[in-house]
Image (cartoon, rainbow, N blue to C red):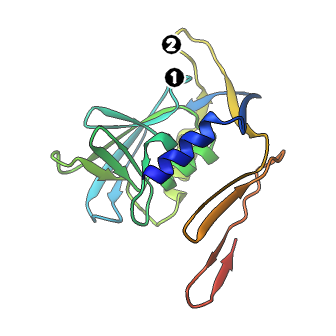
Amino acid sequence: NTHLSAAINSFKSSNLISWKTTGKLQQTLAGCIELSGKTLQSGKVSKVKIWPGFTGQGRYFEFHSNLIPASIDFVRESLLCTSLCKDGYKIRTVEHLLSALEAKGIDNCRIQIQSLDSEDTEVEVPIFDGSANAWVEAIEQVGRKEALDRCGNNVEKLAPYLSEPFYVSRNDSFMVSFPASKVHISCGIDFPKGNRKTV
């Protein structure tokens, strides 16, 4: 955790990224989404309600009245999933939901999540079929609209731009990023038995 936090803070405080306008307006959901299902790690059932948000709020979770931004600042290491933690509360397996929101252009929303056990201090996002498909379909069904601030104004979306190559490694894993006009991701996994997979 210390290693990850140090790398994040170093990256954010450097001159490697700059924020530029995209020419597009911030978006939110046109209505509310509500889905519930079984979770992967604990096998419990959890319920997720996603509400439209105001510009500048970003995507954030609400769990037991605690707000946890969907930000790398709150990411904690966990086995086989991505977890967000704040003030002793943890939300696990957020990657499929957040990927769907990003892919469908939802910049601002409140993600209310609860488990059937009201005493839980951690909760998981339902796994469904193991992909982001259920979230994508739900977002497409409700649609999206321009996000407005509390005074009714729209705001342009900003995006980070990398100014020079960036490299980070840990144990036998590494990541390299290069400045580019379009996003292109290549990844590979070298399994112990020698079966290599590249995507």
Specify the label residue 150 is tagged with: 2
Q: Quadrant of residue 61?
A: top left
Disc number at residue 186? none
Residue 14: give x, y in percent of width and height.
66, 36
> Residue at horizontal 20%, vertical 51%?
116
Q: Position of residue 42 (x, y in %)?
A: 27, 64
For the residue marked with disc 2, what is the amino acid?
Arg
Up-down relation of residue 83 to residue 40 (above or below): above
The residue wearing badge 1 is 54
Q: Residues within 10 Å of mark 1 (few under 14, many from 20)?
A: many
Front one among 111 and 57: 57
Quarter-of-image position of residue 181: top right
Q: Nearer the viewer, residue 146 or 111?
A: 111
| Mark 1 element type | loop
Q: Residue 182 versus residue 38: which sits nearer the camera? A: 182
Which residue is nearer to you in this view: 169 or 88? Answer: 169
Amino acid type shown at disc 1: Phe
Q: On the picture, is 42 further left or further right than 143?
A: left
Q: Is residue 181 in view from this perspective?
A: yes
